[in-house]
Amino acid sequence: MNEFPCHRQRSIGDRREWLTKTALGFGGVALSALLRDWAVAKDDGGGQTSQTGRGRHGVHHRPRAKSIIFLYMDGGPSQVDTFDPKPMLDKHNGRDPGELFRVRPTQFDNNGTVFASPWKFRRYGESGLEVSDLFPHIGKVADELAVVRSMVSEFSEHTAANYFLHSGSGIQGRPCMGAWTHYGLGSESENLPGFIVLNGGLIPPGGLDCFSNGFLPADHQGSLFKPVGEGVANLSPPKRAAPRGREATAKRSLIETLDQGWLERSHHSDAVAAAIRNHELAYRMQMSVPDLMSIDDEDAETRKLYGLDSKDAGTRTYAAQCLLARRMVERGVRFIELTCPSVGHDRWDQHSNLKQGHEKNALAVDQPIGALIEDLKRRGLLDETLVVWAGEFGRTPFAQGSGGRDHNPFGFTIWMAGGGVRGGTVYGSTDEFGYRAIQGRTEIHDLHATMLHLLGVDHERSTFRFGGRDMRLTDVKGHVMKEVLA
Amino acid sequence: MARIASNQPFRVALTIFGVVVGIVGTVGGADGTVGGAKDAAKLEFFEKHIRPTLAQHCFECHGGESDSPDANLRLDRRSRFFAGGDSGEIVVPGDPDASLLIQALRYDGEEMPPDGKLPDDVIAKFEQWVNDGAVWPDEVESEVAATPKRFDLAQRRDEHWAWQSIRQYDAPEVQNPDWCRVPADRFILAGLEQQGLLPAAECDPLTWLRRVSFDLTGLPPSARDVAMIQEDASESRRNRIVAELMASPEFGRRWGRHWLDVVRYAESRGHEFDFDIPNSQRYRDYVVDAWNADIPFDDFVREHIAGDLLANPRIDVVDGSNQSLLGTGFWNLDQWVHSPVDIRKDETDRVDNAIDTVSKAFLGMTVACARCHDHKFDAISAADYYAISGMIRSSDYAQVRYQSRDHNLDIAKRIRNLDKRFAALIQDNLLEKPGGDASMNDTAQTETAKTPPTDDSLLFDFQISAAIDHLRVPPNFARHAAGELKPPGETSEPAFSRYEVAGWSHDPLWDARRTISLAGTEDTGTLGKLPRADRTLATPTFVLEAPELWCRVEGTGRIFACVNGHRMIAGPLHKDTIVDVKRDHPWVRLKLDDYVGKRMHLEFIPKPKHEFTVAAVFQGNDADSRGRRDQWIQDTRNAVANPMPADGEWHSSATMTMLAEQWTTQRRQLTQQIRWTSKVGMALVEATPLDDPLLIRGQADKPGDLIRRRFLEAIDGDSEFGLSGDSASGLSGSGRRFLADRMTAADNPLTDRVIINRLWHHLMGRGIVATTDDFGVLGQRPTHPELLDFLAMRLREHDHHLKPIIREWVLSATYRMGGKVDESAAVIDPKNELWHHRPPRRLQAEAFRDSLLAVSGRLDLSRPSASVPVHLTSFMEGRGRPRRSGPIDGDGYRSIYLSVRRNFLSPMLTAFDFPVPTNAMGRRNVSNVPAQALILMNDPLVHQSADRWRDRLLKVEDRSRRIDQLFVSSYGRPPSDAERNAVQQFLHAASESGQSESETWREITHAFLNSKEFIFVP
C-alpha cells in the first residue's frame, strides 16, 4: 500500500485504465507481467511503500536458483553424529575433555566426558562423502550435497541462535532470510504467498519472529502453512456455508461496485487500488491453496518415495512437508522453510538420550529429504532449487551428563544441495574432536551471503533503510562461499 | 606460501598489498635500534616467514586498503603494527607469551585469523620472530599511510540541520491569505505558491468528520456527530465536535497507543519462553491517562527519564498513585533472556536497547549506532553512548508499590524515630532503678568502642552504625544496635525484649501490607516466589573479587546476587545467584565462581511474617574472619542477654508502664497511617552511581577508559558539565535527573521538534520529517523546516501542552484538503512533499478492529481490569504459548487492551502492521498482504461482527433508513443514489431467489466489511 504518492508507479502506462478493468473484472490481466515490472523497479527510498509480490531491486547477476527450500533442523543436530566423523572421539572416549582441549562455557554447565558417536559412518556415491547411519536415504543422494563442516554461530542459547540463523541478528524483530529474499526478488507465484513456512509442528524457540519481516513491510513476512487440512489460516469462512453460485457472484459484484465507487472518490488512489488487487489475490488463494494442498493427486510411487505410507508419524508429517515444498517450488514460491515435526524428543536438542532422540528425529526427516532431492532432480527442478539443511548450532563432542550433548556454536555442520551448488564436496573442517571450526571457518552471514548469491542477489546491495542505517541481511559481514559453488 | 588446492580458507588476501615498501637505512625492531649482520639475518627471516604470512592472512582486514581496518589495527606498516590497535600494543619484543599477536595466533583468547588457526610451525616462526626482538625494516615515512580519517563531532554538528537551535519564524506572506485558517497554513501555502501549485479543494464536512474521528479517537464517527455536521458544518459546530472528541477518554487510547509504539510496549519478555513483564499494563494506563490529562510534554519526558527522582511527583488525588514513578516503567519494557551464557554481554544488549529506545523516542537520534564505534554519520561519539550507558547501569529495575511508596517510607522513618526515642527513655528509666542493668547501659554507651572487627574480606558491615552509601532501604527494614529495646507490642502487659544481633532487621509488621499485582504477573522464574516490591534490602553495587560471598544473617528469607542486572533466573544457568536463608543457619554462602570481576549487588528478601536480619557480608572463604565475627556477635549477645527486670519490679514502676503505653499508642497511631494496600508497577530506581567504561568495538569483554556520565556532546559541548559526584552543579545519583533536565532544556533543539513531528505524522500520515525516529544524516530532511520550528515554538507558547496544537491543526485548511491530485502538481511534486492534497490512509490495526466492534455494537469503552488475552488459533504454537485463549471478540474491549505478548501477538493486528515491539517504531509500516483480505473474508471476528451488525440493522423497520444507517455506520456518510440502487438490487435479487431477509442482510453487512472504504479514511 502506498501512503505517499509514488512517482514511479504513476508513470506506468495505461495504469488507470488497467485498474479500472481489474476493479471490475480482474480476469484477463497478466498479473505476472506486472509483478515482473515491480520486481525490477527501483524504490525511491520513501521507505513505506509496498505491494503484494513486489520486489525491491531484482537480481544483480545471473541467478543459479529460483527458489530455496530451507530444512530447518530445530534444536541443533550433532555434527559428530551426522556428517563430521571423528575417530579421535572413539580413541579418547570417556576421557576428561579438559585434558585434551580448552572447554568453553556451555549452556548447561554440566560437562561430562568425551563421547564417541554411537553411529557408524559410511562413504556414499562417487564422491565417497561420509554420512552416518542416521541418514541412509540422504546418503543415497550424497553426490548432490555440499557439506560445510566449519559453521560457527555466535550464540549458545536456542532463541538467540535461532534469530541469528534466521535473520543474522541475535535479537527479536529483525527481518529473516525468507523476508529479505522476498523483499529482494518478490514472488513468481501469482496466487500463493512468496515466502511460506511449512510448520511440521514445532515452532522454534523465538516463535514466529524467526519468520518475521522485522522492519520490512509486512508483505514480506512468512505465511504459516500446515502440511494438513486447509493449510493456511482464514482460508475458508467459519462453520456457516459461504454463499455459492449466483449469490456469491452477487455479493462479489456488490463489493466491486462499492469498491469502484470508492476508487473514484479517492481519485484513484494507489493505496486503494492496491487493496483491491490484494483482495483479488486472496480470492485466488482460496482456489489455489486447496489445489496446492491436495497431495493425494500424486502418484503412488511418489507418495511411497517420500514416505507418506511410513509407519512413523513423524516421517509421514515430514514427507507431506517435503512433497508440499516441491509443489510450492513448482508453483513459483520463492522461499520455503520447513520446521520439524514433533517426535516426542524435544527437537534435535538432546541434552540427554542422544541415541534415542537423534534416531527418532533422523527417522522422521531422512527418507523425506532423500526423496525430495531425488524427486526434484528427476523433474529437472534441482538445478533451480537450492536446498539447505541447517540447525542453529551443533553439539559438544563431550557429553552433557552422561548420554547427551550440550549446545556447541563453535563448529558444526550444515549442507546445501541443488541450484548452483557443487555436489559431493566437503568444505572446511573442525578440529580433531569436532569441537571447533579450524579451517574454512564459516559464519551464518556467509551462509546468507551464499544463499542470496545463488538467487542472483548481491548481499551487499540488498539494503533497506531503517533506523538511520542501510540494513542488510548480512549486516556488515558475509562472504560468498565460492568453494561450494558449482 | 603455497595454497593447498582444496579445503583452504577462501577469505585470504588476493594480492599482497603494501609489501613493496622501500627498505632504507637501518632496520629496526620495535625500538628501532638494531644493526649489523646478525640483523640482516633477522631481516631476512622477517621477509621470508613473517611478512608473507601477514600479507596472506591478515591484510584483508588489517591492511591499508580498508578505510577502517578492523580494530583500528594495521599489520601492513611497521609504525602501525607496533602502535597496535584498539586493544593496545600487540607485540612485546622478546616476550612471545605476553604478545597479543602470539596469543591470537595460538587461539588463546582472541582467535586470528578467524577462518582457521595457522599451522603450528607457522606460529612457531612468529614466536621465534618476537623472541628475537620482532625485527621489521624501517619504512620511508611518505609511504606510511596518513592517519585515518578523524571523527569530527563539531563539524558534523555544525553541518547537520537537526542540531541547530530552534528558531522563531514568522508565518510567511502568501498570495491567498483567505485560504489560511491557522498561521501554520501559511507555511504550506507559501511552499505551494512558490511552485505555482494550488492546494486541493476542501473536503466535504463528512469526510472531515471521518478524519477527525479516527485521528483523534481511533473510532468511526458516531451517528450523532454525522447528523450534527450534516445539519450544520459551521466553524463553531466543528469546534464543538473537536472539543468533544478530544475530551473523551478515547483520545488517550488512540494517542497513547501511538506512544506505546515508540517505547516498544509489551507485556512479555519474548525470547524462548515469553515470560511475563509484571505489571507493564500499569505503564500503559499511565500513558493513556497522561495523554487524556494533557500533561505538558516536558513533564511527560521528565517522568519517563527520572520520574522516581522528581521533587514534586504527580500524585493522583483520588488513589494516591505516584504517576511520575510509573513513567519510568518504559525503561524496562525490553526483551529479557534467561540463562545467557555470557551474562555481561547480555547486559550490554539490554543497555543497548534502552539507549536505542530513549534516544529515538525523545531525540530522534540513533545513539545506539555508536555502541561499537563513533557514529558513522551523525555527530554522536561512542563516548556519548557510554555516558548514557553509565546512567542506565547506575539505575535498577524495580517493582514498586506506587500508591504507597513515598508515604510509607515517611511513616517508617517516623516509626523509627519514635522507637529510638522511647527505647532510650525506657533505657534511662531502667537505669535509675536500683535493680537496673549496668551492662545494658554499658552496651548502649560504648558501642563504638565495641565496633565489630574489621577484616580485609569484609565487604559490607551492617552492624556498625555508619551509613552504607547507596544502600536501598524499604520501609520494613531498619538498623538496630544490639541491646536496643524492641517495641512492647500490643499486649495488655508491657513485655519488652531486645534486639540481640545488630544489623538491618525486617519488621514483620509490614508483612500485613496487601500488594495488588496484576494477575499472573509476579516475576516469573526462580525469583518469583517471595514478594519483593518495597520490602527488599539491596546493597550498593560492587565488583566481585572472590569466587564466593559469605553472608552473616539471622532469620528466614532469601539472598539474590543480581549480577550485571540479570534477573531472569530460569533455566540451567545462574541458579547459584539465589540462596535461601533458613533459621539457625546464620552463615550463608553464595558460590559465585562464574562472576568474579563482574558488577553486582545483593538483595535480601525476608520471608513474609518471619524475622530477618542482615549483619555482614564477607568476600572469599575466610574462616578466621567469620570466626571473629561470630565471636563478636556472641559477645554482644551475652552482654545484652541479661534478663529483663522481674515482673514485680517492672510493674512497680508507674513511669515505665506509662512510657510503654505511650510507646504503644503512638506507634499504633503511626502504623494506622501505613497504606496497607497498594497496586504495584514497574519502575526504574536509583542504584549506585558509577561511570561506565567505553567498550572497545562494543565488546563486553573489552573495557576501555571510563566515560563521565553526561549528555550528548553535540548539544552540551565537551564541557566539564556532568556527573561523577559533582554535586556542586546540583548533579548526583545515576544522572537520570540531569538527563531529564537536558532532554527538556530550551537549548536542546531535538525533543520539541521530535514530538511536534510525531503529532504531524499521526495527523497527516507523514511527518514533516518523514523518518520520525531518525533526525540524523540518514533520516529524511524536513519538507518544511521553518514550519517545524514554528510549531515547536508554538508548543513552548502552550507550555508544552499537546492538545491545543492538535486542536488547532485538525481545524486548519491544510488538514481539510481533499484527495484530488492536480495534474501539474503530480508532475512538479509527485511525492506530495509540498502537501498539495491528502491521500487516503488505510486504518491502523487497532482502528480497524475497533471499527468492527463499533459497527456491530459490541464495543465496550471501559478499561478492563487486566489485558484481555489474545484469541489463540491453531496456527499459534510454540514455547510460552499462553495457557488461556481469549474470546474471539476480546470481550468487546478496545484493541489497546488486548494483551501484547511478544511471541503471541494478535494475528489480526499483526496482519494490519501492528509493530513487533523490539525498537522504537514511531512510523508503522503500511502493508498490503493477502492475509488482510483473507481476514476480512473469513476471520471469525469479522463474521461475528457482520452478524451483530445485521441484528442491529434489522431493528430498523424502514428499509430506506436501514440502508442509510448501513452507510453511515460503515463509511460515515449517506449513500449515493447509485449505491442505494446497488443495495436495493442486491436485496431484490436475493428475495427472488428465496433468501431470507436475515440471510441477505448478513451477506450485505459482510460485504460492507469487505469493501475497501471501510478500512480507509479519505
Image (cartoon, rainbow, N blue to C red):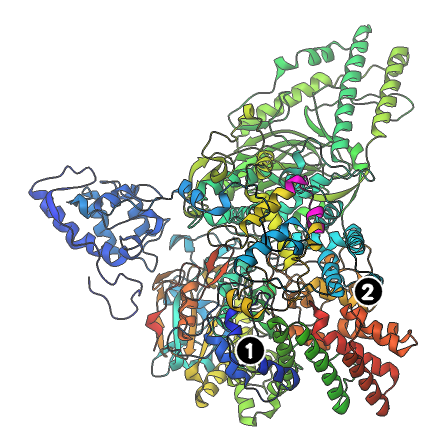
Residue at 53% in and 80% down = A333
Mark 2 — on which chain does it sit? B
Residue A469 higher or lower than B579, as above or below: below
Q: Which of marks 1 and 2 is in front?
A: 2
Question: How far separated are the C-alphas under marks 1 and 2?
Answer: 67 Å
Residue B901 falls inside the magenta stretch: no
Residue at 53% in and 55% down = B783
Residue A209 higher or lower than B684, as above or below: below
Q: Work out which quarter of the rendered image holds the C terminus of chain B and state it.
A: bottom right
Q: Examine the residues drawn in magenta and state their main secondary structure.
A: helix
In the picture of the structure, the residue carrying the numbered disc 1 is A364
Q: Nearer the viewer, residue B564 or A8?
A: A8
In the picture of the structure, the residue carrying the numbered disc 2 is B230
Q: Residues within 10 Å of mark 2 (few under 14, many from 20)?
A: few
Residue A332 higher or lower than B902, as above or below: below
Q: Can residue A288 be seen in this view?
A: yes
Q: Work out which quarter of the rendered image holds the N terminus of chain B and state it.
A: bottom left
Q: Name the amino acid type tagged 2.
A: Gln
